[in-house]
Image: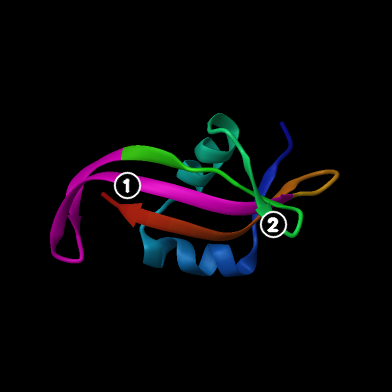
Amino acid sequence: MKPIRLSRHAQERLCDRGATEDEVAEAIRTAPWAPAGAQRFECQKDFPYGSEWNGRFYATKRVRPIFVEEPNEIVVIPVYVYYL
């Protein structure tokens, strides 16, 4: 599979949203891709969380990257994170 690169925006927001680069890469490599418009793709993967986020306990963290498949790499634009 192609290398995965996070855009500057995705890198800057990743920590604020509570995801890691490894989680983003795992989601892209293992979850089914779906069209996200404008030649972009998205996927989502749930990870066990079992911790607090912003003062509430959540069992699961869902990581949903939006990305573009370029000829030599996959470029992640934003990453959305949901706590369930």
Q: Identify which residue is drawn at 52% across, 69% down.
A: 12
Identify the main secondary structure in magenta. strand
- 26 shown above or below 4: above
Mark number displayed over residue 36: none
- Asked where in the image residue 6 lies, by quadrant, the reply is bottom right
Residue at which label 2 appears: 37
The location of residue 84, given as percent across then percent down, is 26, 49
Q: Which residue is mark 1?
A: 61
Classify residue 8 by image quadrant: bottom right
Q: Amino acid at mark 1?
A: Lys
Q: Report how far apart the C-alphas of labels 1 and 2 lie in the structure.
A: 24 Å
Amino acid type of the residue that numbered disc 2 sits on in the rendered structure: Gly
The residue positioned 51% from the left and 39% from the top of the image is: 27
Q: Nearer the viewer, residue 21 or 55?
A: 55
**Residue depth check, mark 1 versus mark 2: number of the one nearer the observer:** 2
* Residue 57 is covered by the magenta coloring: yes
Which residue is at a point 71% across and 31% down the rendered structure image? 1
Q: Secondary structure at mark 2?
A: strand
- Residue 51, given in percent of the width and then of the height, sits at 18, 49
